[in-house]
Image: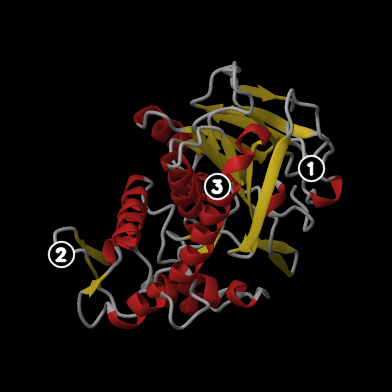
Amino acid sequence: MATSGTRRRDLLHPQRMAALAAAALPRAASEIESLPEELIRAGRPAMACLFEIILSNRDRSRIMTVHRALDLIQELEGQMTVFRDDSEINRLNRSAFDRPVPAETGLFQLLSLGARISSETGGAFDMTAGPLWKVWGFSRRRGTLPDPEAVEKARSRVGSRFLELDESAGTVRFRRRGLELNLGAIGKGYALDRAGRLLRREGMSRALLHAGYSSILALGGPGKESSSGWKVSIRDPSGRTGPLATVQLRNRALSTSGVGEQFFRAGNRRYGHVLDPRTGHPVEKNLAATALAPAAAEADALSTAFLVMDLEDILSYCRRRRGIGAVVVASGPRDGAVQVHHWGLDEDHLEVFR
């Protein structure tokens, strides 16, 4: 069972990285293995984590491009955060029930993606679940056991089906009073995608971008001649030493969500911070879920959805959607044991140790 020391950003970390200075390594990093060439890391705090871009020393002349990508990530934080009154997302939250509100093109596309994933997963992922987070106390970083009526009232104000997106006009409108957008489960991935596009436009074909190690975007592989990808390890959410699995990541994105980051106890029960938008209650099925997708925003949203969904539904989703993979850790039959399930990944790109 996951412990309070297991955090979402700790579940993933590049296993093959060389740094300019060992002191720059985050605590979540694993043992550093040697590479044929040195890698450079550039980072910036944003969205309550450290964003980093890791690139080959051969691309050191493009370091200013890397910093422009990091600048873009911070600009996107200002657009998407719910903690600043002047953010675009809060402007939508204040006004979109009263009238259609124009949205910046990239943000509109992100909302459209989130609405599509919500529909495809039967509501397991939902950008409007903020009222539930508030009623359970997780928005204040202290959980409380809410009254059932309060949960139902909050749940009545949750649902991407109440989000009206007019593609021709580029406007957003809420069809339910009290609806709120919160991009916490998709925004980091979107920022990585936008940064990755900027790097590609500038001719960079090899880099690894991550947001606190919970969301990762790989451009190419670590070596110029190598066809292999970046080797990323998935940490065991039960707290055992050593990785749970490793994944080869090349021109693909990966994100992991887990239940151990925030929780509280009431009576003899433990209540985690990941809520099922469909029921209004904390997730109990799975301990951790990793999603792989062509884009980081999609992987970010799907890792949350897969944490909530039944295993059969995750399998069905991966079969329907090309390029989607999943690694899901569920509780085993014995106390403390875990079961690892995976779909959409071949043996050349995944190695499971549990």
Q: Circles 1 and 2: CB distance less than 8 Å?
A: no
**Residue 12 in view here:** no
Q: Is residue 296 left or right of residue 27?
A: left
Q: Which residue is mark 2?
A: 169
Q: Nearer the viewer, residue 97 or 314?
A: 97
- Residue type marked 1: Leu
**Mark 3 — residue?**
307
Q: Quadrant of the C terminus?
A: top right
Mark 2 secondary-structure assignment: loop
What is the crowding at mark 1: few (fewer than 14 residues within 10 Å), some, or many (at least 20)?
few
Picture residue at 37% right of the left edge, 28% below the top: 322
Q: Which residue is mark 1?
A: 20
Q: Is residue 317 left or right of residue 43?
A: left
Tell me: 236 left or right of 158.
right
> Residue at image x 49%, y 59%?
72
For label 1, the SS is: loop
Task: Looking at the picture, tell me which residue is in the foreground, 46 or 264.
Answer: 46
- Label whose residue precedes the other's in the sequence (1 or 2): 1
Residue 274 lies, in percent from the top left, at 58, 59
